[in-house]
Structures are given as structure tokens and as C-alpha cells.
């Protein structure tokens, strides 16, 4: 089995902390599982910290300094990195998303953030914050669009999204915004940059009716699952739990329309919206 991939500490602050954590752990003669035990976390969790996949939280940083004798190094750097442009419940998931090699997502209500246009994102934020100042909404939109830069690479990460038919039918921002948004998704699919499937209303009940699901895979760390609700989110790393969510996604894929059928439906609905724009 190959050893852990060497990190470039200059690539990101989290990579730097991960490299230092691995160095300190190995100097202490501890395995990942042995270091995780007093923290009540798994060895895979420690591996995700070392790979830069997960953010180091302050409570763990303090304990790591005590266990590894690092004289407050992790606590100091953890505090410096604690500030995030994302909501607390999503910050860690967003950071993991940025380094994932594959992202598979089921969206029951909204176009996933990585696929949203500026107009769609603006309508979402304005709908949730009807009294917010315009510059606040502008900042939120800019931050959301910045996430989509992960799709600038022509091949990585793999993005496979299953959209509930409700995502296509809910008129967010009006007909013009929906036309632009669905054509944007169709264009990405036609360029073979993403895989899109639509879960039609006719499927009826299915395993993911409780909410959205995002699965993230990494080259040098175990996979993660992220579940999000109204103002809340949860990142799961326990292998058995993640495996169950992977099965859920596989069943959604099996029930959804094929990628060609899904593309045809997305384009058809976009065309319907475009006719609404005309007098």
C-alpha cells in the first residue's frame, strides 16, 4: 500500500498545518489511530487533517498541542485560520469541496451552488434576505460564484449532479433567470465537463426525500458526506455512514433519467421559460 502523499505546505494554510501535524505525530511515534484515540476521533479523521481535507477546530488544536508538545503551535494557527467567508455550518464543507477529486450531489430544491449563475444566486440570496443591503447581497453572490472556479479545470474534479425535477420547475428569479441557468447547466453537460441527471416526479418516493446530499472523494483521504438543512449542515466522515450515503446516491442515479434524456429535458424546460420571456 502506498504511503501518504507528500504535501506542499505552501499550497494552502491548511496544507501547512496538515504537514506540521504529520511531522509532529511521526516524531512522537504515534499512528493516526493512536493520535485520534485521546481526541475521541478516528484515525481517518487525523488523516483528513494531515491531508488538508478537513479544517482543524480549536478544541482539537489545543489537545494536539498538549499531546504532541508543540508549544501552542496548532492553537495559534487554528485561531488565525478560523475566519471564513462562508457560514459556520458550511465553511468546512466548502473547504473540502475545493480540494475534492470528485463531487457527487443530489439537489432536491435548488440548482447546486457550483452550477448557479449570478442571476440565480442573487434571487436565492434576496429571497432569503429581503431587507439586506445591496452590497451584502453582492458579496454573497461573489462568494458563491467564486466556488465555481473549481470547474475551471477541464477535467477535475468530476462533478456528477442528480437534480430533482422540482429544481427545473421552481421559477427562481423569473423566466429569464431560469432560461439562463438551465442553459448554463446544459452547456457544461454538452462540453462533457459535468454529468447531469434529472430525477423525474414520476419516480415517486425515494431514499433521499429528507434533503440534499453531497459526497466528496479525495486522492489521499477518505471520502466525506455533507448534509444540509435550513441554516444547518453536517459533515460525516465515519466510513459506514458515508458508505450508506453512497448507496443512496447510487439508487438515485439508477432511478433518474439517463444523461442524454436529462439534457434533453433541461433544454426543453429552458426553451419553455424562454417563450415566457416574450410578450
Image: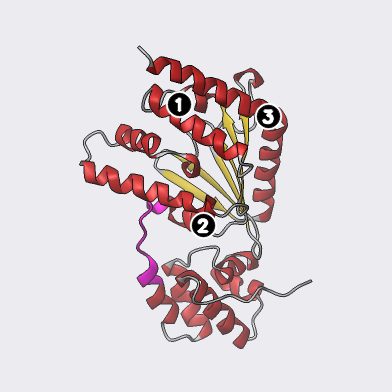
Q: Secondary structure at mark 2?
A: loop
The mark that comes first in sequence, 3 or 1, is 1
Does residue 35 lie above or below 230 as drawn?
Answer: below
The mark that comes first in sequence, 3 or 2, is 2
> x and y percent of residue 117 in the render?
42, 38
Rate crowding at label 1 as few (under 14), some (14 to 19) or many (20 or more) other CA atoms within 10 Å. many
- What's the CA distance linking mark 3 and mark 2? 28 Å
In the rendered image, which residue does mark 3 sit on?
260
In the rendered image, which residue does mark 2 sit on?
98
Taking the image as shown, residue 279 lies to the left or right of residue 208, namely: left
Which mark lies nearer to you, 3 or 2?
A: 3
Q: What colour scheme governs how the chains and residues are painted in the rendered image of this protein?
A: secondary structure
- What's the CA distance linking mark 3 and mark 1? 19 Å
Residues tagged 1 and 2 counted as in contact (Cβ below 8 A): no
> x and y percent of residue 233 in the render?
47, 46
Q: Quadrant of residue 247?
A: top right
Residues tagged 3 and 2 counted as in contact (Cβ below 8 A): no
> x and y percent of residue 268 in the render?
56, 20
Residue at x-position 58% and y-position 75% = 7
- What's the CA distance linking mark 1 and mark 2? 28 Å
Q: Does 82 lie within the magenta span?
A: yes
Which mark lies nearer to you, 1 or 2?
A: 1
In the rendered image, which residue does mark 1 sit on?
179
Q: How many marks?
A: 3
Magenta-tinted stretch? 78-88
Amino acid at each position: 500500500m502506498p504511503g501518504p502523499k507528500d504535501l506542499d505546505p505552501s499550497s494552502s494554510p491548511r496544507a501547512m498545518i496538515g504537514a506540521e501535524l504529520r511531522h509532529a505525530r511521526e516524531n512522537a511515534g504515534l499512528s493516526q489511530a493512536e493520535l485520534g484515540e485521546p481526541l475521541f476521533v478516528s484515525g481517518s479523521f487525523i488523516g483528513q487533517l494531515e491531508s488538508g481535507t478537513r479544517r482543524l477546530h480549536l478544541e482539537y488544536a489545543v489537545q494536539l498541542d498538549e499531546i504532541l508538545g508543540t508549544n501552542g503551535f496548532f492553537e495559534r494557527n487554528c485561531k488565525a485560520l478560523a475566519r471564513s467567508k462562508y457560514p459556520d455550518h458550511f465553511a468546512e464543507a466548502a473547504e473540502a469541496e475545493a480540494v475534492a477529486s470528485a463531487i457527487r450531489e443530489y439537489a432536491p430544491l435548488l440548482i447546486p451552488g457550483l452550477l448557479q449563475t449570478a442571476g440565480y444566486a442573487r434571487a436565492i440570496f434576496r429571497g432569503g434576505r429581503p431587507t439586506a443591503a445591496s452590497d451584502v447581497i453582492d458579496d454573497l453572490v461573489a462568494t458563491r460564484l467564486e466556488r465555481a472556479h473549481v470547474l475551471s479545470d477541464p477535467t477535475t474534479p468530476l462533478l456528477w449532479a442528480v437534480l430533482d425535477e422540482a429544481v427545473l420547475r421552481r421559477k427562481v428569479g423569473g423566466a429569464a433567470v431560469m432560461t439562463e441557468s438551465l442553459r448554463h447547466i446544459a452547456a457544461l453537460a454538452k462540453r462533457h465537463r459535468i454529468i447531469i441527471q434529472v430525477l423525474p416526479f414520476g419516480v415517486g418516493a425515494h431514499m433521499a426525500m429528507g434533503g440534499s446530499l453531497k459526497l466528496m472523494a479525495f486522492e489521499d483521504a477518505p471520502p466525506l458526506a455533507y448534509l444540509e438543512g435550513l441554516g444547518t449542515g453536517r459533515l460525516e466522515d465515519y466510513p459506514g455512514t458515508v458508505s450508506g450515503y453512497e448507496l443512496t446516491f447510487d439508487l438515485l442515479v439508477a432511478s433518474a433519467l439517463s444523461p442524454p434524456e436529462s439534457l434533453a429535458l433541461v433544454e426543453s424546460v429552458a426553451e419553455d421559460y424562454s417563450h415566457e420571456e416574450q410578450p
